[in-house]
Amino acid sequence: MTTLQVQGEDLEIFGTTCQSCSVPLEVPWIRCVKCQPNVDLCARCFSYGVELGQHENDHPYCVVKFDFPLYEASWTASEEMRLLDAILEYGFGNWPAVSSRMRTKSANECERHYLNCYVDNPQAPLPDFQDAECINKGAPVTFKLSENPPRPADGTALWVEMGGYSAARSEFNVEYDNFVEMEICHMNLGEEDDKDNSMQEEEDDDKVLYRDLNLAALEVYRNCLIERQRRKHIVRENGLINLRKWYGMLKRRFDSCLSFDYMRPFMRLFPSITFDKYLESLLYEKQLKLDISKLQEYRRNGIVRLRSVKHYFKLKHSRDQVRGQRHLLSDVLNHLKDEVLFESWLVKQAALESSSKGLTHTLPQLYKKPVPRLQIDCLPGYDKLNELEKELCAEVRLVPQAYLDFSKILINECTKHGFLRLAQARTLIKIDVNKTRKLFDFLVLHRHINKEPASDT
């Protein structure tokens, strides 16, 4: 029974019943002023002049009504009680339902009044808690659904990805050591009283052994439950329930600067927070190296003050634009150094000019600059070649050791089948087709291989 103190008098407001007919009292009811403890009667019993115990019907009385304000002038005591009852029934934060229960106050008014009078600025006659911890525990807390663990609807994509996990129960459909309950479901630790004393004395040792085995089985089951809880804690702690969301977050955060796929195997070596700090340190290291490389670039270009960096980038951008522009003068300057290229360029320009006037003119074949010979003096396998082979490797730009390996493959294949054609050689060695042809012709010319089968004589 809860009491409300008003002007020095305690009024029982919850759980009060008529002491004559035991009917729950409704406002207004009658209270005897003379009798102690208080005698409360409903209006019906009071009109009949009911007397009970020391109470007589001619005692002075008062009418109990809750139409007086407690904290605000616009809120009566009865409305305060209905507000608390509605919050108890519908829950804190469900203000539309509380307002429908109040009928006289809107949802905004109920929320403002409750937070102002009961949470933020509690006033007497509310109980005053001296301990700050009690105040924190007594204050209401607003809860909302969390995304970790998620609660997807059936049939959604996330529900399919989380197959085997029930977020509402925080359980997996297949637990660790899933069938361990089958070992203890038929276990019976009770004593059998229907046996004779003699038989019980003979089976005392068996009972002790049986009981120890059952206790050992229960201990195994307990350890299994502990292991299940530990695994669930690891899954929740490392965000493995919604794995795609967690992995995508880390990849967006680090993959632009770090190879997250390369770093992911190291996750099993660290706790989650330690691994996150490790990635942050690597990212910070890369940023420092990038800043150092920029400073080195500034110093190479003669910049010693940071205020000059902006002007340097403007000049660099303008130089890159000029360098990227291609015009006829640059073509002429590039071809002036080579007379043959310059003549072919003039013929090409003349052909383009004549084609623009409607004249037909075939474009000449542009002169191609010859490919320089390869310096093979210091390359591996040079000492194993003769003069002709050295000339071939230098002209074809083939490493001597590669020439030895390729020629050995072709010669072995020719020895195996008796002949070897160019198409087969191209499938055996995966290099440029022109180099393959020159190597094949060289081996045929010096009769290391045959490109046609030998005729029977």
Image (cartoon, rainbow, N blue to C red):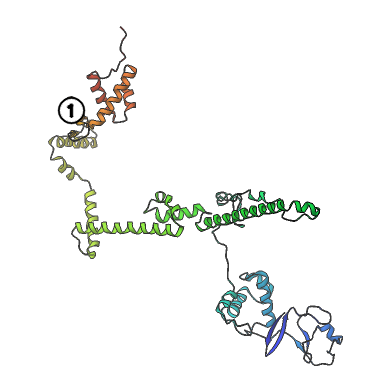
| Residue in the foreground of this view, choosing between 355 and 47 | 47
Above or below — where is 363 with respect to 34?
A: above
Q: Position of residue 163 (x, y in %)?
A: 58, 49
Q: Is residue 194 left or right of residue 95?
A: right
- Type of residue at label 1? Glu
The residue at the point 23 percent across, 57 percent down is 296
Q: Where is residue 396 in the image (x, y as percent from the top left)?
A: 22, 30
Q: Position of residue 32 (x, y in %)?
A: 79, 89
Question: Would you say residue 402 is visible in this rendering?
Answer: yes
User: Please, what secondary structure does the residue beneath circle 1 have?
Assistant: helix
Tell me the quarter of the picture where residue 279 sits.
bottom left
Q: Is residue 320 left or right of residue 27?
A: left
Q: Where is residue 268 in the image (x, y as percent from the top left)?
A: 45, 52
Q: Quadrant of the N terminus?
A: bottom right
Above or below — where is 140 with respect to 212?
A: below
| Residue in the foreground of this view, choosing between 36 and 450 | 36
Query: Which residue in the structure is indicated by mark 1?
Result: 391
